[in-house]
Image (cartoon, helix red, strand yellow):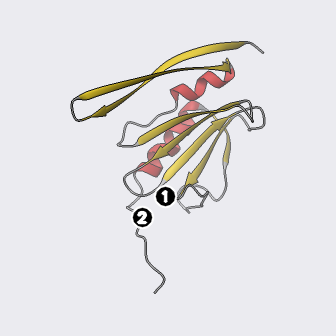
């Protein structure tokens, strides 16, 4: 298993000021596929190194109130995707999945992320 150090920059835009944070992490050739996982619809994405699992995680948040976690690490079934609520809890949805989706390709992850982004806005109700 080849290990390489990947350098990347995360750009954050605030008004007209640009901030750049540069990071480096060691990941395997197999794990580099997570960098191709994305969706062209509005979202916020966070990339996290998961050293305790030997891998990486991408967390997506969508304006409709849903989110997703995509991971690839030493214990995952290839690329895995889980549907999340606003609190980061794994949930199920009849149009997406009733469990964590494993053994996904990059295209498979991207397709599921697009479905999540297109779900109707999540309506939150209070228990009163």
Label 1 secondary element: loop
- Quadrant showing the N terminus: top right
Residue at (39% x, 43% y) in the render: 43
Identify the disc placed on residue 86. Answer: 1
Residue 15 lies, with reference to residue 82, above or below; the image says above
Residue at (53% x, 59% y) in the render: 87
* Foreground pick, 7 / 40: 7
Mark 1, other Cα within 10 Å: few <14 / some 14–19 / many ≥20:
some
* Foreground pick, 23 / 84: 23
- Could you tell which of marks 2 and 1 lies nearer the N-terminus? 1
* Residue 79, position as x, y percentages in the image: 65, 35
* Residue 72, position as x, y percentages in the image: 67, 33
Label 2 secondary element: loop
Q: Are marks 2 and 1 in contact (CB under 8 Å)?
A: yes
* Residue 101, position as x, y percentages in the image: 65, 47
Residue 15 occupies which quadrant of the picture?
A: top left
Q: Is residue 75 left or right of residue 28?
A: right
Label 2 vs label 1, nearer the camera: 1
Residue 102 lies, with reference to residue 48, above or below; the image says below
Identify the disc placed on residue 59. Answer: none
* Residue 14, position as x, y percentages in the image: 28, 35
Residue 59 lies, with reference to residue 99, above or below; the image says above
Residue at (55% x, 61% y) in the render: 93
Q: Residue furthest left?
A: 16
Q: Which residue is mark 2?
A: 122
Mark 2, other Cα within 10 Å: few <14 / some 14–19 / many ≥20:
few
Residue at (35% x, 43% y) in the render: 42
Residue 103 occupies which quadrant of the picture?
A: top right
Task: Find the distance from the CA under tag 2 to the CA under tag 1.
Answer: 9 Å
């Amino acid at each position: 298993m080849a290990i390489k150090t990947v350098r990347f920059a995360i750009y954050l835009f605030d008004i007209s000021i640009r901030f750049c944070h540069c990071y480096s992490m060691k990941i395997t050739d197999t794990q580099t596929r997570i960098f191709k996982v994305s969706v062209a619809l509005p979202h916020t994405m966070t990339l996290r190194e998961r050293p305790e699992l030997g891998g990486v995680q991408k967390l997506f948040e969508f304006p409709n109130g849903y989110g997703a976690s995509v991971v690839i690490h030493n214990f995952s079934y290839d690329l895995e995707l889980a549907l999340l609520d606003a609190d980061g809890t794994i949930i199920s949805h009849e149009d997406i999945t009733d469990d964590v989706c494993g053994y996904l390709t990059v295209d498979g992850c991207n397709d599921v992320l697009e479905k999540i982004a297109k779900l109707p806005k999540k309506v939150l109700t209070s228990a009163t």
